[in-house]
Image: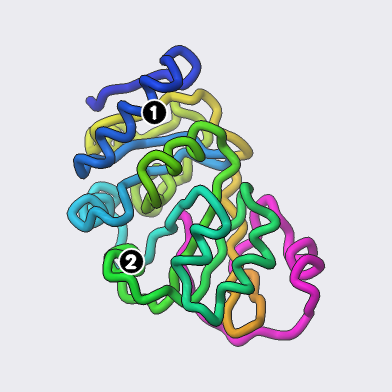
Amino acid sequence: MPRILLLEKEGAEDLLQACAAVLRGGGLVILPTETVYGLAAKADHAPAVRRLFQVKGRSPDKPLVVMVSSTEEAAALVAPEDRDGIRRLGTFWPGPLTLVARAAGLAWLEEVRAGSADVGLRVPHHPFLLRLLAEVGPLAVTSANLSGGEAPARFADLDPVLLEGVELAVDGGESGTGRPSTVALVSGGRLKVLREGDLGEEELRRAWGSDAPFPEEAGPSGG
């Protein structure tokens, strides 16, 4: 079994440094978010990202979401032509929204993108997770379930098989809404909602300011 730390009982700084040490060392950590529990690796640590795919049983052609600490950090990870779209809908961040855009030409993003030209980005609305992201940098994250399983909103619902595959798990009790993040593709000056979650399509379109259709494309999701 992994080391399990309680979010409410551990000293905030001690918990932060314990998670940071595992992630910097190439380990995997299970973390609470404002939606469901996530399985995380340091996004620029290629062996850790590959291991995340293996532990989850995730298809190697399914991209991962990259969590970052701010909208500007997210904008820096996408192609220049898509940065305006990130900033326009980044007004919903921190929050349960994943934005998918054309990836910048950064070598470390290749493992996370899994062959896709796009990258999915999110700034989570979770105080501890935001502190961790500011400490260690971007994290590659997927929901903390085996591929095909249900994403857990409670620590007690985590699959024991998945727990055996990680170095550290943070028990935050009930994680959040239990619903996955909304996923929206923002590219080429247009918007397409790929998956509705806590944020509805109407809210996003009002913020975007356009009802223009968007060609069908695939992108990363958090599941």
| Secondary structure category for the residue under label 2 | helix
Q: State yes or no: residue 109 in magenta.
A: no
- Residue drawn at (60%, 64%) of the image: 195
Q: Which of marks 1 and 2 is nearer the N terminus?
A: 1
- The residue positioned farthest toward the top in the image shown: 9
Kindly identify which residue carries mark 1.
16
- Residue drawn at (35%, 76%) of the image: 105
Q: Which of 194 and 11 is in front in this view?
A: 11
Q: Position of residue 108 (x, y in %)?
A: 28, 64
Mark 2 neighbour class, 10 Å CA radius: few under 14, some 14 to 19, many 20 or more: many
Q: What stretch is highlighted in magenta?
A: 194-223
Q: Where is residue 145 in the image (x, y as percent from the top left)?
A: 39, 44
Magenta part, dominant SS? loop
Q: In which quarter of the image is the N terminus?
A: top left
Amino acid under label 2? Leu
Which of the colour schemes (rainbow, by chain, secondary structure, one colour) is used?
rainbow
Q: Where is residue 132 in the image (x, y as percent from the top left)?
A: 43, 37
Instruction: Indicate left or right for 39 with 3 as reference.
Output: right
Kindly identify which residue carries mark 2.
109
Amino acid under label 1? Leu
